[in-house]
Image: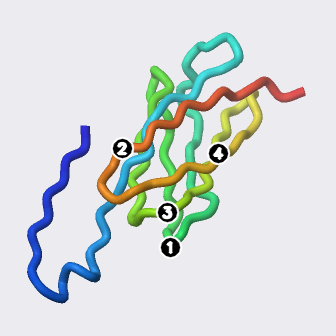
Amino acid sequence: MLAAAVLLHGKDQENVTVPSVISGRVHDAQRQPVAGARVYVIDSPVPVSDVAVLTDEDGSFSLTVPAAGTYRVGFMAEGLGTGEASVKATGGRLVPLNIELKPQP
């Protein structure tokens, strides 16, 4: 669970961005977790430098993104192909995202 509290006064409040977390699981067509899948940011509302993680043994991942807005997130795993999804992050919130990767033809 993500909790954030920021207390600022005056002009500093205008320049604050609160990170969000995009979190979920990657699974295959049989609903089995995909360990070691790469989860990465393709496009974001602000410049980000190579934001990527690998899924855990249970297929779970968490990506911290720096600002509110719409993010395009990519997924890939050996033998299962690729996928992508768009998610809207709002400052300081946990954004759930669950992805199914299908075998490559």
Crowdedness near tag 4: few (<14), some (14–19) or many (≥20) residues, C-alpha within 10 Å:
some
Kind of residue at disc 2: Leu
What residue does disc 1 label? 46
In this rendering, position of residue 70 left or right of residue 56: right
Taking the image as shown, residue 73 lies to the left or right of residue 96, namely: right
Q: Nearer the viewer, mark 4 or mark 3?
A: 3
Mark closer to the chain start, 2 or 1: 1
Residue sitting at 33 percent across and 49 percent down? 93
Report if the CB atoms under discs 1 and 4 are less than 8 Å apart: no
Amino acid, disc 1: Val
* Tag 4 and tag 3, C-beta contact below 8 Å: no
In the figure, residue 36 lies in which quadrant?
A: top right
Q: Which of 17 and 80 lies nearest the eye of the viewer?
A: 17
| SS at mark 2 in the image | strand
Q: Which residue has dot 3 on it?
A: 69
The answer to whether mark 1 and mark 3 are in CB contact below 8 A is yes
Q: What's the residue type where badge 3 is placed?
A: Gly
Q: Which mark is residue 77?
A: none
Looking at the image, do the residues carrying marks 2 and 3 touch, with CB atoms under 8 Å apart? Answer: no
Q: Which residue is mark 4?
A: 85
Q: Amino acid at mark 4?
A: Ala
Residue behind mark 2 = 94
Q: Earlier in the sequence, mark 1 or mark 4?
A: 1
Label 1 – label 3 distance at C-alpha: 8 Å
Cα gap from disc 4 to disc 3, whole angstroms? 14 Å
Q: Which class describes the residues within 10 Å of circle 3: few (<14), some (14-19), or many (20+)? A: some
